Image (spheres, rainbow, N blue to C red):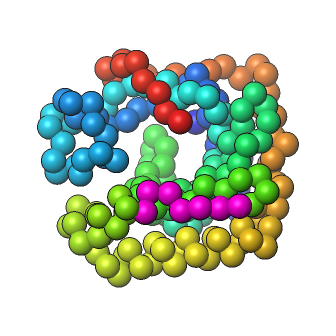
Amino acid sequence: MRVIADNEDGLLLWHPAGSDFARLVDADGKTQHEVTVDRMRDPKLVLLTWQKYDILVLMPPRAAYSVWWFFRDGTFTGWYVNLETPYRRQPDGVDTNDLILDIVVTPDRQWEWKDVDEFDGHIGNPLYFDRATADAVRAEGERLIKLIAAGDFPFDGTYTDFRPDQRWPTLRLPAPLDPQPGLAE
């Protein structure tokens, strides 16, 4: 992703459609959404192309979430709240772990949970999280839902008019990832 800002509000990142991203898949093409990591057969990172939507991502410091602004053909189409561990800086970027449960939000701030069954199915799995962690993840989601309902930052219209510099190139990952045709929505 392209770094737009790195300040007290957090990391603000841009990832346009057509750019590369990497995803862990197993020999059968299954992702972690379809099979737990311990059951993946011969897992590897593959190079895919992000499709349909441009995204602007805010990763607030020490926060257990990121907020994604989705744009299609330059028009804001909604937010996505990705519940995740607070990011940790690394020499080549940042690391975070996805906590599965997400919130999808329309431009008029109607919201719905996403991946509830998958989240509930991983509670107690030692590779994922225990009940206490799951309760904390859901509580953070509930806190964010209150911000959504109130129209508070970051759901207050901030960045909904974001326009990238047209000179920015499509983002490419370095080899040696195995290129695979793919699609993310």
Rendered-image quadrant of the N terminus = top right
Residue 135 shows in this picture: yes
Q: Position of residue 138 (x, y in %)?
A: 48, 74
Q: Horizontally, is 179 left or right of 101 in the view?
A: left
**In this view, 54 is above or below 130:** above
Q: Residue at x 85, y 42 (%)?
A: 161
* Residue 111 on the magenta span: yes
Q: Is residue 165 left or right of residue 104?
A: right
Return the x and y of residue 77 as percentages of the image width and height: 73, 43
Residue 146, quarter of the rendered image: bottom right
Please state the total of marks drawn on the protein image: 0
The answer to whether residue 84 shows anywhere in this view is: no
Which span is picked out in magenta?
A: 110-116
Left or right: residue 135 versus residue 163 is left
Relative to 17, is 24 above or below?
below
State the residue in front, 109 or 68.
109
Q: Is residue 86 magenta?
A: no
> Residue at position x 15%, y 34% from top?
42
In this picture, residue 72 sits left or right of residue 157: left
Residue 48 at what x, y percent from top left? 43, 25
Q: Residue at x 40, y 18 (%)?
A: 181
* Residue 172, position as x, y percentages in the image: 52, 22
- Identity of the residue drawn at 19% across and 29% down: 27
